[in-house]
Amino acid sequence: MHILIVEDEAGIVQFLTQGLEEEGYEITAAFDGLQGFELVQKNNFDLILLDWMLPKMSGLDLCKAIRIKDNTTPIIFLTAKDTIQETIEGLKAGANDYIKKPFSFEELVERIKIHFRIQKEEETLSLGTIFIDLAKHTVSVNENEVSLTQREFELLCYLVKNKGKVCTRNQIIEDVWDIHFEYDTGVIDVFINAIRKKLNLRIEEDYIKTVRGVGYIAND
C-alpha cells in the first residue's frame, strides 16, 4: 500500500516514514500543499496523511481540491487544530478521519488498517460462493475464475449490489443498459441465462432467482 504524507515538519515526516515503512507501507512525502496536490495528480495513492497548516496551499484547501477531482482516496488529517468546529470543517472538506497532534503512532497504524480494510470491502462483492473483485474486474465461483463479458459482469454486479431486492426488468434496462425509452427487456433474460451457464452453480447454489413477470432477485 502506497501512502502519501503531506507535512511541512521534517522531523514528523522522518518519524512517520520510518515507522510506516517498518509496517510494510511504501511512503512518498510532500512538504507543502501544492507539491502534495501535484503528486496526487500524477500518482495513485492508497491513503493520504495530511497536515492542516501547510505552506503554499493549506491542508484544508488541498483536501477540497482532491475531492473536486472525484478522487476518493482515504484522507486522514494529522493536525494540532483541535476544536470541534475545526474537526467538522475538516470532515466536511472530504477527510475520512481526524487525528489530533500529538498522536500515538500505534493508534495511527490501527486507523490506517481500518481504512484499508474498509477500502478492500468496498472493492469486493460476494453472493454465496460467488466472489467479485471490482478492482481486478474478476469473478470466481468456489475460487475458480469465470470469464464474463463486460455486460454480463455489469449485470451480475448490479444484482449483487441490490442483493435481497427484486430488480425489475425495466430497472435493469435503465440502470445497466442506460436505456430510458421503451425497449425489449427480453434481452435481459438472454444475459441472465448466459451468466447462470457460465457460473455453473449447483442446484443448492441458486443465488439468482427469477421473479415471474417482474424481474430477478439475488440472494445468498
Image: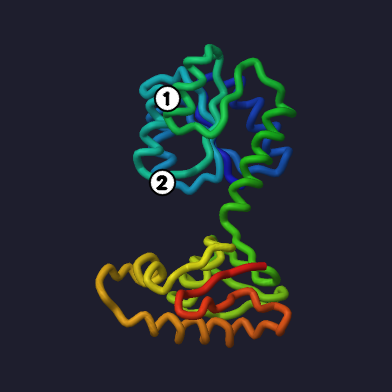
Where is residue 30? Give x, y as percent: 48, 31
Residue 199's image quarter?
bottom right
The residue wearing badge 1 is 60
Where is residue 59? Give x, y as percent: 44, 25
The residue wearing badge 2 is 42
Taking the spot 52% from the left edge, 68% from the top edge, the residue there is 159
Amino acid, disc 2? Lys
Q: CB under 8 Å between callouts 2 and 1? A: no
Amino acid, disc 1? Leu
Question: Alpha-carbon distance for marks 2 and 1?
Answer: 20 Å
**Left or right: 17, with 216 as reference point:** right
Where is residue 76? Give x, y as percent: 55, 31
**Front in this rendered view, residue 39 or 89:** 89
Taking the spot 53% from the left edge, 12% from the top edge, the residue there is 83
Where is residue 23? Give x, y as percent: 72, 40
Instruction: Tell me if residue 112 comes above or below residue 175 in the rendering.
Output: above
**Left or right: 127, with 96 as reference point:** right
Label 2 residue SS: helix
Instruction: Tell me if residue 105 comes above or below residue 171 in the rendering.
Output: above
Q: Kindly give the residue lying farthest to the front in the view shown.
A: 213
**Front in this rendered view, residue 39 or 156:** 156
Closer to the observer: label 2 or label 1? 1
